[in-house]
Amino acid sequence: QVQLVQSGAEVKNPGASVTVSCKASGYSFTTYYIQWVRQAPGEGLEWVGIINPRGGAATYAQRLQGRLTLTRDTSTSTVHMELSSLRSEDTAVYYCARVSMEKGAFDMWGQGTRVTVSS
Amino acid sequence: DIVMTQSPDSLAVSLGERATIKCKSSQSVLDGSNNKNYLAWYQQKPGQPPKLLIYWASTRESGVPDRFSGSGSGTDFTLTISSLQPEDVAVYYCQNYYTTPTWTFGQGTKVEVK
């Protein structure tokens, strides 16, 4: 079945980098954009960035420009999200989700990956 | 960026009663070329990722119970749960996808049982 499976929880020190992976299965990987959303503890949803798995072009939320990098590996149908120079305010659950062109919205979500930034 | 504002922030409704959530965008999300409103609604239960309920403002996602409905156009939208069930306790978010590829969410509305 269609699913997105994310990598496990991470604990990082301030200033470090973290990479979260999102592996797609059950559909044609290069047909659907993958976007990332994060949710700080007790807070709402914040859009982080999006990548086109076909060519690899990515767009990032302005507040994360320069620290966020999205890449994809078509051989493993996996998208990677790297966030550098981590700060305490980056502590959140990070979700990947598939963008449906037909619906315009995010119709399939990963289970989420908790990233904790703490010294 | 388009700002999405939901109201109320939380509401408590008796089982079997109607729940109504409003979402207002700071600018229109209606595309005049195709007459589609680029507005979605999601449901999020504790410890789970969001789930798509409604897209194009009023189209119900496959498998979503018909007690959920979306309406509105332009800048003002509504999500209605016609008869609240215990499993509907969740936080609901509206989302603009007019400003592709940057999307914005409302702040969320928490629905509880009175």
Image (cartoon, coloured by chain):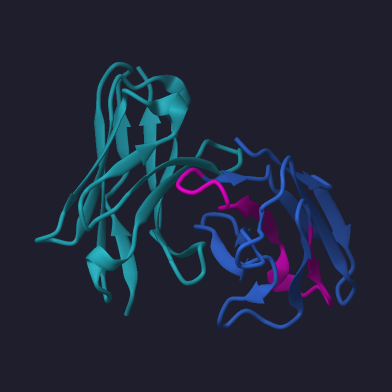
Chain colours: A cyan, B blue
Name the foreground residue: B10 vs B77: B77
| Residue located 31% across and 25% down the image | A67
Q: Is residue A15 positioned above or below B31 on the image? A: above
- Is B80 within the magenta? yes
A58 vs B34, left or right, is left
Point out residue B55 in the picture as x, y percentages from the top left corner: 61, 67
**Lateral position of residue A5 relative to residue B8, left or right:** left
- What is the magenta range? B77-102
Q: Quadrant of residue B63?
A: bottom right
Which of the image's four quarters has the C terminus of chain A?
Answer: top left
Q: Which residue sits at x=51%, y=58%? A: B48
**Whole-percent x and y of residue A81?**
28, 41
Q: Position of residue B26 (x, y in %)?
A: 73, 40
Q: Residue B17's quadrant in the figure?
A: bottom right
Residue B112 visible to an observer of this rendering: yes
Residue found at x 68% / y 65%: B57
Instruction: Answer left or right for A4 relative to A29.
Output: right
From this view, report whether residue A34 is shown above or below residue A68.
below
Direction left: furthest residue: A75
Front residue of A103/B108: it is: A103
Quadrant into which the N terminus of chain A falls: bottom left
Q: Is residue B46 above or below residue A84?
A: below
User: Quick check: is B88 in the magenta stretch?
Assistant: yes
At 29% from the left edge and 27% from the top edge, which residue is drawn? Answer: A12
Residue toward you, A67 or A57 = A57
